[in-house]
Image: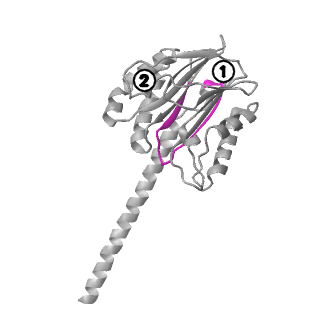
Amino acid sequence: MAAIATQIGTAIQNARLVRASLAQQRLVQEMQLAHDLQMRLLPTGAVVAPQAEVAARVVPAESVGGDFYNLFRLGPDATGAMIGDVSSHGYRAALIMALAMSASAIHAQASTNPGETLTALQASLRDELSTTEMFISVFYGVVDRAIGELRYANTGHPHAFVIGAAGEIQRLSALDPPLGMVDRPPHAAARPWARGRDLLVLFTDGISDARNWADVRLGEEPVLDTVRANRDRPVAEIVERVFAMLAAHTGEVALRDDLTLVIVRS
């Protein structure tokens, strides 16, 4: 009887281990599926070619994340580029990210004024942001090649720059708090745009805040220096070089936040 009891106990334990293993496999498969689906939401540079040359990359800290970007063809000479960072990462942030992606695709076609577009986006996300107590930093710029102008709105996004032909760097500072923090329409601003020479450089703080094994933060300067040193190369190559520099800095250290970089030439 003791031997039979031992065998039964062993069989039960083995069954539990098998079920746990199968559940873990299903979880891994579902997380991979969620990652693949989220990456498919992000557009390629082809959607705005040949009016603009755009390269972008998103690397979530977990299977899915809250960083996103979007690209819009707004006519024969106007290109829209948006980057956003939801105030968290993981599945909750990914849901807000997906809502922002779908809503921005609708609102961007209704106006070439970035302030109006972000105002409409804020209205679409108001209930979700209030319920989840989350917010989104968003930069949205419209490059108008016909008149040589960049119009933009910036709601709390810290890393938005234009790098000129001579290597000069201008920060496009935030004009308003992140979406979800205040209930007022975002403002818009404009600056000259040198067709084919200026670069619009957008990235999230996961890049600038990336740490190495000694807990040293990367910062903005290495990113901007890498872009400036390679500014005459294709934008896809510039993105590759920035991420190579980032990988050299972080090594095997796990990501603490999502990473997103967008570079536009038009």
Cα distance in 3D space between marks 2 and 1: 25 Å
Residue 54, magenta (yes or no): yes
In this rendering, the answer to whether 3 lies above or below 31 is: below
Residue assigned mark 1? 51
Q: What residue type is labelled 1?
A: Gln
Give the residues in magenta. Answer: 48-71
Circle 2 residue:
121
- Residue furthest out toward the top: 147
Towards the viewer: 129 or 15: 129
Q: Residue at x 73, y 28 (%)?
A: 167
- List x then y, in percent, for residue 13: 33, 74
The answer to whether residue 109 shows anywhere in this view is: no
Position of the N terminus, as image quadrant, is bottom left
Q: Is residue 164 left or right of residue 211?
A: right
Query: Residue 155, relative to residue 144: is it above or below?
Result: below
The C terminus lies in which quarter of the figure? Answer: top right
Residue 165's spot in the image, x, y percent?
75, 24
In the rendered structure, the answer to whether residue 165 lies left or right of residue 14 reads: right
Crowding at dot 1, Cα within 10 Å, few <14 / some 14-19 / many 20+, comes out as some
What is the total number of numbered labels drawn onto the structure image? 2
Q: In terms of sequence position, does the residue under pointer 2 or pointer 1 come before the other?
A: 1
Examine the image and state in which quarter residue 201 appears: top right
Amino acid found under the numbered disc labelled 2: Leu
